[in-house]
Image (tube, rainbow, N blue to C red):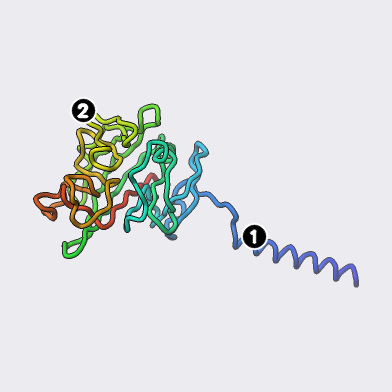
Amino acid sequence: MHLLTLLFGAILVFMVGSSQGGDKCEVCYLKDCCEDPISSGGRNIKTSEGKIFGAYCEQGWTYIFRRFNGEEDFYRTWVEYQHGFGDPKWKEYFIGLDNLASFVKGRKCKVRFDLEAWPPVSPAKRFAEYSIFSIAEKTDKYRLTIGGYSGTAGDSMGFQNGQRFSTYDQDNDIDSSNCARVYKGAWWYKACHQSNLFGWYKGPVCPKFAQCVAWFHWPTTIGSPDNYYYSFKKASMKMYCC
């Protein structure tokens, strides 16, 4: 009888332990947010190359960056952009160029930019989606390939196609100046930009030409004298590779 009591107790402890372990995962990784298309929030991602990073997931999309209140400084160094910064669970963030390049490597991906203007602009929310999207590795300075626009926000990324990434301390654009330094951001600058979503968060009026969170080809003129003098309230970039 005593032996049966001990055996029953051991089984009960095992079952409770297994139940607790099933409800809580210390470190859980997804290869892609599309593996869990129902949930939203910060998740841990592990690429096929073993790169591990945090990202915000929403309906199967993996967010590259989110900006919505200006609390995170995006005027950062090359090394910071390589590694990423911010908090993907609750705050503004960028996943990092190394992680981004590893995530899309060898995969067919699309990318979407969501923008929100300040009141009284209506409609305040518009998007730009591109059916072609890839990022080269660091040896090619994370060169951008993007195309196949559709959406409501206007095409302000086609101009950046084929460009390498630049920061104020790593000038890879084709302009005679350092576009990142001139326009207070970091981006796939050409000579220089039609979008500057890592620019200065200052809205809705941008006090300096093209230095803020800019998207020039918004269908209506919401800045004065043009949209290079507008800074958006919210901006995000997300990818879908499944």
202 left or right, relative to 2: left
Q: Give the secondary structure at mark 1.
A: helix
How far across and down, in percent of the image, does residue 77 sit? 37, 38
- Kindly identify the residue that appears in the image at 19 percent across and 64 percent down: 119
Numbered badge on residue 21: 1
How far across and down, in percent of the image, does residue 115 sit? 25, 54
- Kindly identify the residue that appears in the image at 44 percent across and 40 percent down: 83
Give the residue number, with chain letter if any, for mark 2.
176
Numbered badge on residue 161: none
> Which of label 1 and label 2 is nearer to you?
2
Q: In the depicted view, which residue is nearer to us: 94 or 107?
A: 94
Q: In the depicted view, which residue is nearer to us: 133 or 93?
A: 93
Binning the other alpha carbons within 10 Å of mark 2 as few (below 14), some (14 to 19) or many (20 upward) gives few
Disc 1 marks which amino acid? Gly
Label count reads 2
Disc 2 marks which amino acid? Ser
153 left or right, relative to 47: left
- Kindly identify the residue that appears in the image at 27 percent across and 46 percent down: 199
Outermost residue toward the left in this view:
225
Q: In the depicted view, which residue is nearer to us: 94 or 143?
A: 94
77 left or right, relative to 131: right
